[in-house]
Structure formats: structure tokens, C-alpha cells
Amino acid sequence: MTTIDPRAYIQLSGPDSRKFLQGQVTCDMEALTCGTTINGAHCTPKGRVIFLFSATCNAQGDIVLQMHQSIAAIAMASLQKFAVFFKTQVADISHQVADHDLQSNLERLRTGSAEVVDKTTDLFIPQMLNLDALGYISFKKGCYTGQEIVARAHYRGAVKRRMHHLQLQTPTLPSPGDSIQDSAGKAIGNIASAAQVDKTTVEILAVLADKAADVTEIQIGEGQLEKITHLPLPYEIPTGP
């Protein structure tokens, strides 16, 4: 299937743009140079992911954050809340940017990278989405919003839920944020991303409690109990700091 969700683009311009983001996001914005891309997350003070982004910059120092379209308004509001204290202007420039060379939803899912959309904002801490394995987090940069929670989960091994790649035979595409129950009806996690493979097959990225990591049947939302196949992720999950 070739479904591609539309993207949104938020531009930060002004002399304090990089400094502002450095104190807000999980990645090291000082590593961003013209012609490169860096991935990161913006979190709440409690370490929950508000939105994910891929950042680029131009020769003038303007920084553009690409993200899922459904999260654009939430991202704008979150950034503008703190941008007023810096010499930076935040603008949605989605109408000025032509999407090209974008991965399909299935291709993105198979890289082990989940989207954060309007239904899943403020639901997961970064490590639940395996962002530490994907290079979205710098543990060497200075403080940023939510950093204490993210660092504690890293150094104290406090991550009790991780994202898994699963396949199930169903014509119904789950929605991000849908609850997941085991065969006993116990809540064990949530859908992070889902994509249709064909008319009867779906692949999902599911955040599951460690105790349920080897589950063989799940119920999504109010649906039926479904047998699942565990598929490998294309990266190793960190086991310690």
C-alpha cells in the first residue's frame, strides 16, 4: 500500500532560534548544519512527547521542522508558549513547501519509527517509542524541557514499556492511540502507528508493557481477539546507559 500521510512544516527564524530549540528538544541542535537533517522530540515537563520532528536549516540560519500534519497546531502552540522569551519567530509554512521523496506510511513503520499524531501527543515518553535507539535523544547536551524524566529513564533503567513491530491478519486498520488488551482483557499498551500491507494484513508499532512483550494474541480497542506475529525491528534496543 502506498498511503502517505501529509506533512507539516514549521519554520523558526531569528537570531535565538537555535538557542531556543536547544532548551526545548531532545536532540542536540548545535549538531545541525546546513544540508543535514537531525531528528528530535519536544516533550512536556513530565517527559511526554508532544511531537516528533525532522529538522533542517538554511544558510540564513532559519530552522524548519517537518512533522505529521495532524500535530501542527499543537506543535505551534507548544513552541509559541516559550518562544516569546527569545528573538525567534515561529510560523507554519506548510503551504510554501512541496512534499517530495516522502516515505509511505508502511515504509516509515518498517524503519521502526512511529509517528506522533494528534491522538498520541502526551501519551509516550521518548524511550517508549525507542527514540534512544533511533538517535533522537542526546544524553550529553544540557537541560531541556522534560530532560530530567528522560535521563532518569535512561540511567536508572526505568523504561517498562517498549515499542514492538507486529503483524496481524485483519482488514481493519487500527488508529494511533487505540488501547491494546491481552487475551485476559488486561490493558497492556497502545498503538503507536499502523499501516495496511494488503486487504487482509496490517502491520503495527505497538508500545507494550515489558511483561507482555511475548504476547501472542491481542485485542485492539473494542475489536476481536487477534493472533499476532512478532517482526524484528531494524535496530537494537538499548539495555543500559
Image (cartoon, helix red, strand yellow):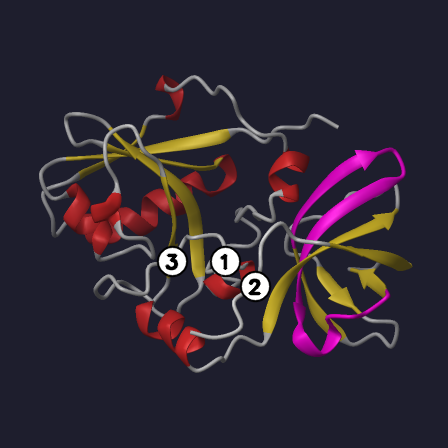
Q: Tell me the quadrant of the picture where the C terminus can be found.
A: bottom left
Question: Split into 4 quadrants, where in the image is the N terminus?
Answer: top right
Spatial CA span between label 3 and label 1? 9 Å
Residue 137 is labelled as 3
| Residue that sits furthest to the bottom in the current view | 156
- Which amino acid does the dot numbered 2 rest on? Ile
Kind of residue at disc 1: Ala
Q: Residue at x 28, y 48 (%)?
A: 79
From the image, state whether disc 3 or disc 2 is nearer to you: 2
**Residue 223 visible in the current orientation:** no
Front residue of 206 and 81: 206
Residue under numbered circle 1: 133
Helix, strand or loop at mark 3: loop
Query: In front: 221, or 16?
Result: 16
Could you tell me residue 64's position as x and y percent?
30, 33
At x 54%, y 28%, the residue is 6
Residue interval drawn in magenta = 192-216
Up the image or down, 15 lies above or below 35; here it is below
Sequence-first tag of 3 and 2: 3
Residue 167 image position (x, y, % from top left): 80, 50
The residue positioned 85% from the left and 50% from the top of the image is 168
